[in-house]
Image (cartoon, rainbow, N blue to C red):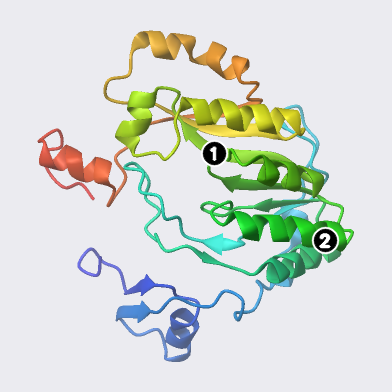
Amino acid sequence: ILEQGAHAVFVGDAEYTLPRWIDEGCPSGIFHGEPVNLNKIPLPNRNLVNLDDYRIVPNNDILFNAGDLRLPIFSSKGCPYKCIYCDVQQKAFNWKTPERVIEEFQTLIDMGATSIHILDDCFNIKKDRVLEICTLLLKGGIDVDWSVRGTVEINEDVIKSIAEAGCKRFHAGIEHFDDNVLKYFRKSHRYQHIEKFCELCNKYGINVLVYLIIGVPGETKKYRKNLPEMIKKLNITMPFINVLSPLCNTPYYEGLLKDGTLKKDYW
């Protein structure tokens, strides 16, 4: 990366190495950071931005009503799953305690947030942590529209708890409805799990927003033709469809290099 023209490269967690680098006059080089304790670093100082720039202006294209100020938080970093197309490089799951998450929720609400989106790589890795977060939200009387980004969830206690705690939307990387493709992707779920996930979300009043991928080796025209009906059948209210892309440092990209589909390393 330095040879391509970068001034500095940060490897690993940079919450400490980046400010230290700035204090040292921004030298050139490669700087390594150890995993940080997310509970000991300060919360983002959101007062440094003009929140009016982020306010939601009512219009006909809004997918859902989340008030006039929807703000994100990260309650964790990393995802241990090994999907072949995904460029999330941090595979170790590093998380904030439930108490810390509630503290950040309250900070955003005090700033006027009408909606909070937990923009984790995968929120629901640790089920007991999710349940405790929900318990604390209810115990603290925190009443705000919120949503999460995570993996297909078939534990009814988890879906029930997040619904009772105020979660309105679950953003999930379903990716495909064909079990052979899911296996090729190295996904941990199969179609039966997708059905269960959607059933539970519909049962407890959580809107399902999913990410889907088309353009997969072995995918048929029939599958793509039937895709809209499959989405409707599962009552998925917000589908986002992407074309499979060979992202840097992913097993999918490396496989295309190895089998000769890609003639050179573009990245």
Say which residue appears at 68% left-offset and 51% top-offset: 117
Please state which of residues 109 and 188 is positioned toward the viewer in this rendering. 188
Report helix, strand or loop for mark 1. loop
Say which residue appears at 31% left-offset and 42% top-offset: 84
Q: Residue 247 at x, y = what percent? A: 32, 45
Q: In which quarter of the image is residue 181?
A: top left
Please state which of residues 206 and 26 is positioned toward the viewer in this rendering. 206
Q: Quadrant of residue 74?
A: bottom right
Identify the mark at residue 109; answer none if there is no mark: 2
How many neighbours does mark 2 have within 10 angstroms: few (below 14), some (14-19), or many (20 or more)?
Answer: some
- Give the Cα separation between the discs numbered 1 and 2: 28 Å
Say which residue appears at 58% left-offset and 53% top-offset: 123
How many neighbours does mark 1 have within 10 angstroms: few (below 14), some (14-19), or many (20 or more)?
Answer: many
Q: In which quarter of the image is residue 171?
A: top right
| Residue on which disc 1 sits | 152
Amino acid type for the residue under numbered disc 2: Ile
